[in-house]
Image (spheres, coloured by chain):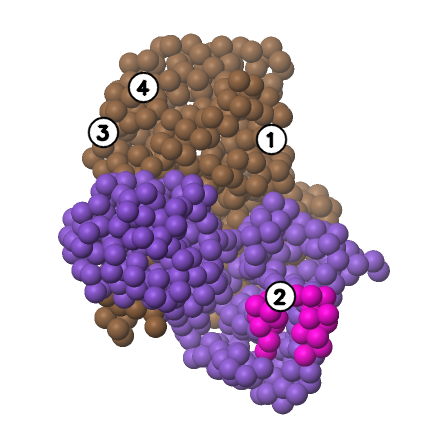
Chain colours: A brown, B purple
Amino acid sequence: MGLEGQIEQIARDAHEAARTVASLSTNQKNAWLARCAERLEAAKPAILEANQQDIREAGEKGLAAPMLRRLELAGRKWDSMIDGLRQVATLPDPVGEISQMRVRPNGIRVGRMRIPLGVIAMVYESRPEVTVDAAALCLKAGNAVILRGGSESFHANQALGAEIRGALADGDIPEAAVSLIPTTDRAAIDHFLKLDEYIDLVIPRGGKGLVRKVKRDSTIPVIAHDEGVCHVFLDASAEVEMATEIVLDSKLRQMAVCNGLETLLCHEEAVQRVLPTVLKALHEEGVEVRGCERTCQVFSEAVAAADADWREEYLDKIVAVRVVADLDEAIRHIQVYGSEHTDMIVTNDYANGQEWLRRVNSSTVGINCSTAFSDGYRLGLGAEIGISTSKLHSFGPMGLEELTTRKWVLYGDGQLGA
Amino acid sequence: MGLEGQIEQIARDAHEAARTVASLSTNQKNAWLARCAERLEAAKPAILEANQQDIREAGEKGLAAPMLRRLELAGRKWDSMIDGLRQVATLPDPVGEISQMRVRPNGIRVGRMRIPLGVIAMVYESRPEVTVDAAALCLKAGNAVILRGGSESFHANQALGAEIRGALADGDIPEAAVSLIPTTDRAAIDHFLKLDEYIDLVIPRGGKGLVRKVKRDSTIPVIAHDEGVCHVFLDASAEVEMATEIVLDSKLRQMAVCNGLETLLCHEEAVQRVLPTVLKALHEEGVEVRGCERTCQVFSEAVAAADADWREEYLDKIVAVRVVADLDEAIRHIQVYGSEHTDMIVTNDYANGQEWLRRVNSSTVGINCSTAFSDGYRLGLGAEIGISTSKLHSFGPMGLEELTTRKWVLYGDGQLGA
């Protein structure tokens, strides 16, 4: 059987296994999660050795240091990966929940029951822990999953996958419930993205190139996790201290995350009172300020921003800063340059806060808080498979519930349509 | 400007207009619906004349009589189209509704607000009233809409569209909120389906060929309204009278609808007691019975079914009938041959009813009722844009709510992620 034939077989088997996974009880799924944690801990030395092999090979290929760090599985990353499995076990099972139950005038009772999506394909890069996270979340939500990790973490992914599948077999669950694509061959992956007969959803996580390629080539529905050009808008009434803390946290809490601040907008009436303090604090933390003309007037360390800066996801210690005439101009800037990801206002004005929440149609919008809150854990989802920038199905941070759909369930006693 | 350039301009204008539509108040949208009804009534003679022109031209091209009937806009169809506009005005506006509001441990309040999807493209065939229905529902849910109707109803669609757009202009709403693609040129439509930068969702409604073409060629997310191979399963405990009424209603209430019964399954233990009565009633109504071997034994008018019959969406006075050993075999049959549309059980057995609702993962599943209940009106949605056979975003009958998405809204007082 050729490579394409093998991949098609994996998809067909996953489709078949999905029926079993959809029927597993919550106890069965939680027991599997516990077995995964045990087996991974027992196999830790061999897995970390496979991980080291990936890192050595990537180093020889000249991968940059930040990329090499993303490959690393040892230390705190390992512990939080194992913790994650135990946490997913504690989360409520979304499958089977019935909502919106109502009685129709003819006495029929109708409601909507949560059911798994079926087969989910994850296409991701570098970070090997995604193999474990994605398998845990997809299965807990009752789905089979097909994992296609990056070539640079091939050995670690295979080693992790073997334990996850072993934990399935130990519980008499078909191993096809979690599959790994055994190749990084490009043509084979293109073929994979056309298997909409067997696969219900594909989630790409990685760089822009990967996400766009999947969106372009897939006939399977895609939920994209694309870039975040996130904004904080300092309104005329913004308090200096709160503004400074929120801006620093949004920009610096963690580098290279999609919910980090990239463009700071400031109301003209707050320029003198608030902006220099905020920019000084950023500058002291080593952040480069790229400002509009007005910004450069009030903050001499700023360099002039080009138009391209307003569209840039720096993922680095750089911030673009623009002064706007009013709330309306701030919203207009976001509509033109933003990526519909995460946008916050700092204000003490009731009407402006309400207007912000109503008119800025990004996946997460908020008043007086850090952009860091665009995050499944901080929003209380308990876990996160990613942050969707697709409006269909789920917009923003996605947890277990977002890995399911709903069917209509009807309780009749002989009702007819006529 | 070439045709492709024109279409791209329409999409760009719709994208821009969508911001205005998203901000309209419920009163503004309802006033537009009322103006549409008034203008359409005033222009009725001219619109019906355009409709007659379509029907004449289609007749000259040799279109079959049932297709010609679908083109017809006069009589009851006109009245229900106008009534539909007034009903949509009475439906609650989904935009702005906040749900799942909760307070996180650090005091930040988070919730999810319903917002429009943006720009929706409808691609449909023949029935000109879809032009009005789709515009009404998409706009009430806060979206701009681009309509691409079939060539056979071109003149009626243009005439209807002119009034709808006139009603927009009368209320100072950008006319680009409702656009009609001014061509049925194939290459231009292919180009249209790639405009994912401006269009958020495409809904194809029509024959299998159309739906598959759109799914294959679109880079815009698609919610498909595909075929319905719907089942009724007569369990061992099914009551004869209820079984007969439900089967007749499911098969005959309306012909050529996707929620009509196509395959009847019968538990072996109900064969002698129930099946002959049910099949006799169908036969008396002129329905052809295509049965498995066992069916042909107990009902002499049945003809032998081929394997292909189990996959067939007849949309006609034909029913496939199969006897199964038990509930499990019935569910297995549906998993293999069904289309995940609508499947009902007739039973008086509590455990079997529960198992049916749990294990049959079609978009509408029910106990002791007609397949006709897979319908937005009968389920209480108040309106229906179609019945989705896509699991993503919305599965089953879709109303106003399904034409929106949700964003996260955060109310903080200085919370940081650190």
Distance between the alpha carbons at the discs numbered 1 and 2 = 41 Å
Disc 1 residue type (three-letter): Asp
The structure residue drawn at horizontal position 44% and vertical position 37%, both measured from the top left corner, is A120
The structure residue drawn at horizontal position 56% and vertical position 59%, both measured from the top left corner, is B206
Disc 3 + disc 1, Cβ < 8 Å: no
Query: How far from the left and from the top, in percent, is residue A394?
Result: 45, 50
Give the class, few, some or many, for how many residues have Cα within 10 Å of label 2's Cα (few <14, many ≥20): few
- In the depicted view, which residue is nearer to us: A224 or A298? A224
Specify the quadrant that holds the C terminus of chain B.
Answer: top left
Residue denoted by label 2? B64
Distance between the alpha carbons at the discs numbered 1 and 4 = 29 Å
Query: Along the polypeptide, which appears first: circle 3 or circle 4?
Result: 3
Same chain check for tags 1 and 4: yes
Residue denoted by label 3? A31
Chain at tag 3: A
Q: On residue A237, which mark appears?
A: none
Query: How far from the left and from the top, in percent, is residue A53?
Result: 49, 10
